[in-house]
Amino acid sequence: MAQEEQVLVISRDILAEVGLFQGLMFDTDRYLDKIFAPGVPRFIPRSSAESDPSYKQIIPYVIITHAGKCLCYVRGKRAGETRLVGQMSIGIGGHINPGDDGFPLLGFREAYDSAVEREVEEEIHVRANHNDRIVALLNDDSNSVGSVHLGVVHYWTLDSFDVDKKEQMITRMSFADIQELQTNRESMETWSQLCLDRLDEMAKHAYSN
């Protein structure tokens, strides 16, 4: 019998202690210091995490950009989160598991950073050089998916469009400018809508760090 997937979570109480918010939060350091403090993050079975909003699953959500355009795609039928199938997304990311490089040998923050690179590489192949900045946290308690997840929004600035898809769940992948993305906003998953609405602000944070 296959062992159940374990995912990285924090207690919702930790988020509430720092300051519960809805949407995007750009004051990231204050939250990240608490989220990755010793004894705070832990792994629990995914089935428990998906059905218990007292936990927040930590999800890296990577926005990939070059020359004023943003990577976008449609989640295919093989997407791990079936509730998002068929929706457009501008974020690459997924759950953090104990098998990811560095857990538990490194500190959780260092191991998380390594896992983000691995997660992106599982879904797409980025041949271009890139800069990675954490620009925001994303919390959306307005729906069943968002209520059990907390996004850590990364902004990758590439030096070319040299990106290929790898995962079958990535379909209709392309780079699009903000105007094109706004035209398709209503077909996007909620997290992507929230990010799209403040994409210019994210860029400013990425370039100012």
Image: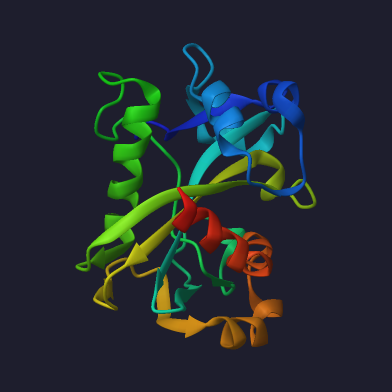
Residue 160's place in the image compared with 156, above or below, is below
150 left or right of 8?
right
Residue 80 seen in the current view: no
Residue 192: x and y in percent read 61, 65
Q: Is residue 136 above or below residue 85?
A: above
Q: Residue at x 30, y 25 (%)?
A: 103
Name the outermost residue toward the left.
Answer: 127
Instruction: Give how far across and how far down residue 161 sits, in percent.
Output: 29, 78
Name the outermost residue toward the top: 39
Tell me the quadrant of the picture where the N terminus can be found. top left
From where the camera sits, is residue 111 visible? yes
For the point 58% across and 88% down, the residue is 180
- Labels in figure, total: 0
Image-based side of 114 in relation to 202, left or right = left
Q: Residue furthest right?
A: 142
- Colour scheme of this structure image? rainbow
Q: Position of residue 96 (x, y in %)?
A: 41, 38
Q: Quadrant of residue 81?
A: bottom right
Q: Between 194 and 143, which is closer to the camera in this rendering?
A: 194
The residue lying at 24 percent from left, 66 percent from top is 125
Q: Nearer the viewer, residue 48 or 95?
A: 95
Q: Residue at x 58, y 38 (%)?
A: 28
Question: Residue 204: x, y in percent?
Answer: 54, 60
Vertical side of 155 occupied by 178: above or below: below
The extreme front residue here reads 208
